[in-house]
Amino acid sequence: MNALRSFEAAARHLSLTKAGLELRVTQAAVSQQVRILEDSLGVKLFRRVPRGLALTEEGEALLPAISDAFGRINQVLDRFENGRMREMLTIGAVGTFASAWLLQRLGNFGRSHPHIDVRVFANNNRVDLAGEGLDYAIRFGDGAWHGTSAERLVDALFTPMCAPAVATRLRTPADLHREVLLRSYRPGEWAQWFEAANCKQPRMTGPIFDSSVSLAHAAAQGGGVALLPVALFWYDVLRKRLACPYDTQVYLGSYWLTSLKSKPVSPAMQAFRDWLLAESTKARPRVVKPKPARARRQVLAGHPHADSRSTRGQSVR
């Protein structure tokens, strides 16, 4: 090990003197260890040049493997803390869920599981669990992905949401005909809501956004009315950035915790799963509106609990 460490330092600095300073030994000690390694392998790893050292072909071939090995050893050693090994958990999550729901709660997981380091990568719902090295992926759809197990986290019940000042002038669904309706890139979502509300859909001319987060931001700024999942933007309602002027909600899919069926479940994965499922099942307070509105029915269009049909949309949500 000393010989390999001396070679790696000398090869990185191309100097026995600098290697000795890093390893806190003399130049002669580094030279001796390098010579031991060369004798063991039966090849020369360095050659002398006017301004110091240069790697031979054999040395150039050996250095990347040695550097990678020491780097991986150091990464594992760095995970030991207070007599316990820190665990790493890698999560991929569709962008809206990550920014509007998960990140607001992730601090609670860290406080209750300080030995687990969580890495979160936002994605567009198209993920390769194995290729990207993910322990879990949180996706939007119907839960049917080949080769994966899926557990429902949050049902996406969509309803119109807007700035509180805009909500004060919305009493019936027909009032939306006078408002700017913000749209996602997926057509037909507003049509489903107007059908559920027993109201004719107006001509759609509002701006189109590529994520619900962008829609919510525009709506909160008074830019129009957005069709959004209440569960993901409930904090914005509590903070009075957004309001829900209507009771009617329409089901367009769910968010799911998915993992490869072939992947063994580590203690960190089990802890995260248990925490996330508990968080997702907590009861939400009832929607607070800026003023009383006429009672309307809630419609779970295509909801898997309502009938046997299944929504197969793989929307970016």
Image: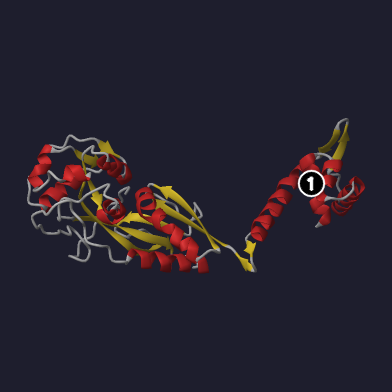
Which quadrant of the figure has residue 298?
bottom left
What x and y, as percent, mark residue 91?
Answer: 46, 56
Asked whether residue 147 is in view, the answer is no
Relative to residue 79, is residue 197 depicted above or below?
A: above
Left or right: residue 313 versus residue 94 is left
Residue at image coords 90%, 50%:
29
Residue most extreme to the top: 50
Relative to residue 93, is residue 217 depicted above or below?
A: above
Left or right: residue 261 versus residue 298 is right
What x and y, as percent, mark residue 290?
Answer: 17, 51
Which quadrant of the figure has residue 177?
top left
Q: Colour scheme of this structure image?
A: secondary structure
The kind of residue tagged 1 is Ala
Name the image quarter holding the N terminus: bottom right
- In front: 85, or 7? 85
Left or right: residue 144 versus residue 47 is left
Left or right: residue 76 versus residue 200 is right
Local SS, label 1: helix
Mark 1 surroundings: few (<14), some (14-19) or many (≥20) residues within 10 A: many
| Total numbered labels | 1
What x and y, as percent, mark residue 316?
Answer: 32, 47
Relative to residue 82, is residue 38 depicted above or below?
A: above
| Residue with the mark numbered 1 | 9
What x and y, as percent, mark residue 3?
Answer: 83, 53
Asked whether residue 87 is in view, the answer is yes
Relative to residue 236, is residue 89 depicted above or below?
A: below
